[in-house]
Amino acid sequence: MEATTLVSLRDEETKGHEKGPQRKYTRSDMEALRFVQPEYQLELFERVYWGLEPTVRLELDGIFVADSNKKKKRNRNRNKNKQRNRNNGGGDIASEEQLVAGTSNQSGMGENMQCEEDDISDDSYDGILKPAFLVEGEPDFESGPPVDGWEYLRRVRWEADQLPDVKVAKLNLNEINAEQTPYMPKIPDLPKCPTNLLPSKKWEDYFLNEFSELRKAFSQLSSSLDPSNSSPISKSSIEDQSLVAPTVATILNMDAVHRAATLRNYIDMAESLEKLSRHDCLWLFALCATVDMPLHADTCASLRCLLRKCLGILATKLEMDDEVAMLSVLVSICGKYFGQYDNTI
């Protein structure tokens, strides 16, 4: 393959066209032709080059300049490494000198058509830094602000050339960590309740089973009805204590979205109270028994707040009373049935 010339290859391709199928060449075949008849290759390239539009030739010149700068930079790095090896008294200097000499002696068309597999990583890096517009000449800083886009690009390229290829920042992690804003706020632990006031496991299992059956019965009832003029109960109505005790008809008059909104409104009001009355607990129980699953994220957050509020009140109690019983019911619903014990930080 090394003895094959481009002229004979062209003649062979012409014959191939006349006969029908074309010949396919492997990568090794094409690489063997890189330095065969460089004068003829240059002649072919000039024919194509001067047949292009001026704007296309300008872009092509920019590619050649960037490719040439990349090779010069690589050669400078190799020279630095060679000098470092000499200073350290080691390294295969002779072989590296041959490599640098072989690279620097390749110019013109042969250099531009060379395919080097060891430049794959360089190409990916230079692909980001390769200039989109070719500018020539040095910037004129004495003329004041740039008067056109070309002068601006010259100054940008000049500033880029002053920067090192790699910049390593020295960070003091101790100072950064001290100024870092916490990603999540610190939420206090759940209040600890007296063990004698907590419901037993047997009672809790029985209650949660009855609560689940209640929800199923309401779901079957509400699915057969179409609530008309549905609207959530506002916070002002809740705070004015103008609501009567919750009835099935009242709850059925709200659709799923408005029931969840009313539950959130009631919990927001309950968080501002020092204690929960029987009227408040009845409404919270009724809304928890009728809210649709799966829960919205805002509703889950409200139930976590209700759980924390109930546990906070229970932690202040010393003996059993009606309020402890009602709060224990709400704690079992929020914490165990809706699973907010596991999700509370």
Image (cartoon, rainbow, N blue to C red):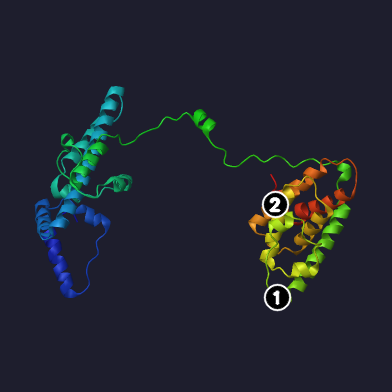
Residue 84 is drawn in which quadrant? top left
Residue 83 at least partly seen: yes
Which quarter of the rendering shows the C terminus? top right
Left or right side of 156 for 172? right
Q: For this rendering, which residue is in front, 97 or 175?
A: 175
Asked if residue 248 is positioned above or below residue 329 in the image, the reply reads: below
Residue 184, position as x, y percentages in the image: 60, 42
Residue with the mark numbered 1:
226
Which residue is depicted at the point 19% across and 49% down? 62
Residue 88 is drawn in which quadrant? top left
Label 2, label 1: how far apart the Cα atoms are: 28 Å
Q: For this rendering, which residue is in front, 13 or 129?
A: 129
Q: For this rendering, which residue is in front, 65 or 242?
A: 242
Residue 259, position as x, y percentages in the image: 70, 63
Asked if residue 232 is positioned above or below residue 65 in the image, the reply reads: below
Residue 185, position as x, y percentages in the image: 62, 41
- The amino acid at mark 2 is Asp
Residue with the mark numbered 2:
268
Which quarter of the rendering shows the N terminus? bottom left
Left or right side of 147 for 278? right
Left or right side of 158 for 88? right
Asked if residue 176 is positioned above or below residue 198 in the image, the reply reads: above
Regarding mark 1 in the picture, which secondary structure is present there? Answer: loop
**Which label's residue is closer to the chain start, 2 or 1?**
1
Which residue is depicted at the point 82% across and 56% down? 279
Residue 196, position as x, y percentages in the image: 89, 43
Residue 5 at least partly seen: no
The image's mark for residue 318 is: none
Which residue is depicted at the point 15% across and 66% down? 12
Confirm or deny contact between disc 2 and disc 1 (CB under 8 A): no
- The amino acid at mark 1 is Asp
Left or right side of 251 for 85? left
